[in-house]
């Protein structure tokens, strides 16, 4: 059993229903624009998309943990991955780079404590770190992107917290792209699908990161530019070469299938595209083996 993997069979995951995250129409009206959503989410359609998304996970044997709603969190709390990081010694709670999400780590902390899930530690101010900027390349190597949501102090604290279970933390620098207000994480351009297969968007990848993957013998599935904004690069691995992605990315889907992957799809216009967060963002994997 290991928690330090992005590709081993997914056993349990933490997700959040739109009824818990979005709550009601008034909350959506008040928050969607200031949170930089591309458009206003439709609550009923969001629930329908989420139900299909959840059913695919359940059909693949994944145990579902669901966060309850909170008056202290925003629409963004549906993206559970960003708030914590899994290690073999327990969960690391992040300190969010997006100020509107500052209360989410406490929300997950309460859930972990009530569920008997070990907490290894927390990233504390002035450190900033978001889970979307962190990915296990293998079970002993952690990749971290230094960008607008994750700073040097957050990375320093992370290195200290994982030093007993991780042989190497490799730091890469994210591009400016659309600036501080945009949602841009390491996993915006990288989704591992097997130990030697990853979906990438090379035009925005740090060169050193892309070179590192190639050096390790990773086959790169190159997402075309026309499928980047539709979250073609945001792919959740359920098990090696079994993955889940948002509908509307036929080229990337075909390339994955050509590489021997099984691809499940779901409609994600409301819960993914409008908030710029795909299936990896919707999930905090808790256990893989």
Image (cartoon, grey):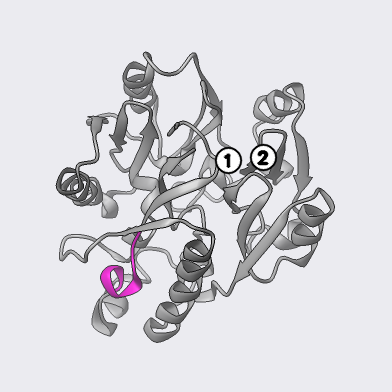
In the rendered image, residue 69, in percent from the top left (x then y), is placed at 21, 66
Q: Are marks 1 and 2 in contact (CB under 8 Å)?
A: yes
Horizontal side of 193 relative to 103 (left or right) equals right
Residue drawn at (79%, 56%) of the image: 257
Q: Nearer the viewer, residue 114 or 48?
A: 114
Residue 41 in view (yes/no): no
| Residue 111: image location, x then y, percent | 20, 50
The residue depicted at 24 percent of the width and 82 percent of the height is 26
Residue at coordinates 30% horizontally, 31% vertically from top-left? 90
Determine crowd level at label 2: few under 14, some 14-19, many 20+ residues with C-alpha closer than 10 A: many
Residue 41 pos. (x, y %): 42, 78
Would you name the residue on which mark 1 appears? Answer: 7
Residue position for label 2 = 194
Residue 140, label in figure: none
The residue nearer to you, when weighing 232 against 266, is 266
Q: Is residue 234 visible?
A: yes
User: Any magenta on residue 155?
Assistant: no
- Magenta span: 15-22
| 182 w.r.t. 146: above or below | below
Q: Secondary structure at mark 1?
A: loop
* Disc 2, SS: strand
> Which mark sits nearer the N-terminus, 1 or 2?
1
Give left or right: position of 38 versus 247.
Answer: left
Count of marks overlaid on the render? 2
């Amino acid at each position: 059993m290991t928690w330090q993997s992005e590709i081993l069979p997914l056993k349990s995951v933490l997700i959040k229903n739109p009824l818990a995250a979005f709550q009601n129409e008034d909350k959506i009206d008040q928050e969607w624009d200031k949170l930089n959503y591309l458009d206003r989410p439709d609550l009923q359609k969001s629930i329908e998309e989420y139900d299909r998304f959840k059913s695919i996970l359940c059909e693949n044997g994944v145990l579902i943990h669901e966060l309850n709603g909170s008056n202290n969190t925003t629409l963004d709390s549906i993206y559970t991955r960003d708030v914590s990081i899994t290690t073999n010694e327990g969960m690391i709670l992040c300190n969010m780079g997006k100020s509107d999400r500052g209360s989410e780590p406490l929300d997950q902390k309460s859930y972990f404590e009530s569920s008997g899930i070990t907490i290894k530690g927390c990233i504390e101010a002035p450190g900033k770190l978001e889970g979307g900027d962190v990915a296990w390349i293998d079970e002993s190597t952690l990749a971290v992107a230094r960008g607008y949501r994750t700073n040097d102090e957050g990375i320093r604290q992370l290195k200290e917290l994982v030093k007993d279970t991780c042989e190497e933390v490799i730091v890469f620098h994210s591009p400016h792209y659309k600036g501080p207000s945009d949602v841009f994480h390491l996993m915006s351009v990288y989704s591992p699908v097997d130990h030697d297969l990853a979906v990438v968007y090379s035009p925005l990848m740090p060169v050193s990161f892309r070179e590192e993957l190639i050096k390790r013998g990773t086959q790169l599935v190159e997402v075309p530019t026309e499928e980047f904004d539709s979250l073609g690069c945001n792919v959740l691995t359920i098990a090696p070469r079994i993955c889940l992605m948002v509908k509307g990315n036929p080229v990337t889907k075909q390339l994955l299938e050509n590489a021997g992957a099984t691809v499940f799809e779901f409609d994600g216009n409301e819960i993914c595209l409008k908030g710029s967060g795909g299936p990896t963002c919707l999930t905090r994997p808790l256990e893989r083996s």
